[in-house]
Amino acid sequence: MLLIFSRLCCVKNLSQQTIMFIIFRVLLTLIHLLYGSFLWGRRQWREWKLWCDELWHGKDSRLEAEVLISSIKGVGNLPKHLAVILGHEAVSFLDLVRIVSWCVIAGIPYVSFYDHNGFLRKSEEVLETKLAALKPELNEHIAVRSHKNGINGTKHKTKVQLLSYEDGKGKIVSLAQNLAKAVTNGALQSNEINIALLDEKLHSKGIPDPDLAFICGDTFSTYGFLPWQIRITEFFLIPSHHNLPVTDFVRLLKKYSKCEQRYGK
C-alpha cells in the first residue's frame, strides 16, 4: 500500500483528489477480498463442523431425535412460535420436514416458513406429500396452512404456516389501500382507524406472534416478514436451512431460552 502511494505521488499531473480516489478504491477492493475470504472460511468451517456432527451423531433421524430429546432436557423457556426466513435460498423440502419434526419433538406448537418470493405458498401440497412420505408417524401431529387454507381442529400438536411477502409488508400495503377506499366510499370513518382495528386485520387469528426467528444466509434482513408481529421476536442468523445440524438447532433453542424479554422496560 505504501509502495502504491509513493508511486502515485511521483506521477505528475495527478491531483490530490484523484490520488485519494485511487487509494480509496484500492482499500475498498482489499476489504472486499478480505470479506470474501472470511465468508469462504466460514463456509468451510461450517462444512467441516457438519461433517464432524454427522460422523459423531449420524444422519439417521432416530439419532437426531435422541440428540434433541436429551439436549433440551432442562431448557425451561422454549418458543411457542418459531419462524424460519429462507431469504434468497432455494427451498429444501427435506430440510423443512426435518425442522418440522424437531419442532414436534421439542413441543413447539407453531412453526412458520417465510419465502418472500411466494414459492412455498404455491407448494403446500408438495410439503404435505413430503411430510407424509418421510415422517408418516407425525401425520396426526402436524397441520399445514397457507393463505388458502386455515387450520381446523385442535388435535394437531404443531401447526405449520407457509408465508410470503403478501402476508407481511404486502398485507399492510393492501390493508392501507382497502381502508382508504372504505373511507372514500363512506363505509368507514377515518377516526375509526386505530391500533385495535389494525391488530384485528393484521394478526393471524389463533396464532401467536413469533417469538423466535431464524434468518438463513449471510444477510441479516427480514425480507418483509410480518413487520406488525415481530416487536418481541428474537432473530438469529444461520448460514443455511440446508443440512442444518440438529446440534445447531438445539444450541439456538438454548440461546433463546436465556434471552430476557423486557418489553421496552
Image (cartoon, rainbow, N blue to C red):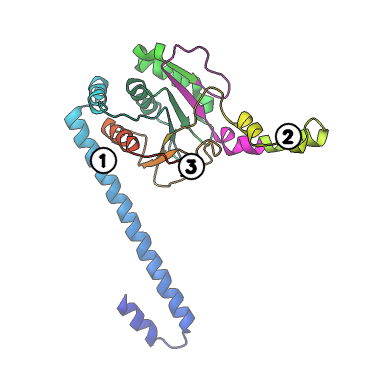
Which range is magenta?
A: 145-174
Graded by Cα atoms within 10 Å as few (under 14), some (14 to 19) or many (20 or more), the crowding at tag 1 reads few
Q: Is residue 55 above or below residue 14?
A: above
Q: Residues within 10 Å of mark 2 (few under 14, many from 20)?
A: few
Circle 1 — which element? helix
Q: Determine contact: label 2, label 1, CB under 8 Å.
A: no
Amino acid bearing label 2: Glu
Residue at the limit of the structure toward the front, as seen here = 265
The amino acid type found where label 1 is placed reads: Glu
Residue at the disc numbered 2 = 192
Compare residues 1 and 213 and report the one nearer the observer. Answer: 213
The local secondary structure at tag 3 comes to: loop
Q: Is residue 122 left or right of residue 105?
A: right
Residue that appears at 44% across and 14% down = 156
Left or right of 131, for residue 1: left
The mark nearer the N terminus, 2 or 1, is 1
Quarter of the image for the N terminus: give it.
bottom left
Measuring from the top left, give residue 85's x and y in whole percent. Answer: 45, 36
| Label 1 or label 3, whichever comes before in sequence order | 1
- Closer to us: mark 2 or mark 1? 2
* C-alpha gap between disc 3 and disc 2: 30 Å
Q: Residue at x 39, y 27 (%)?
A: 96
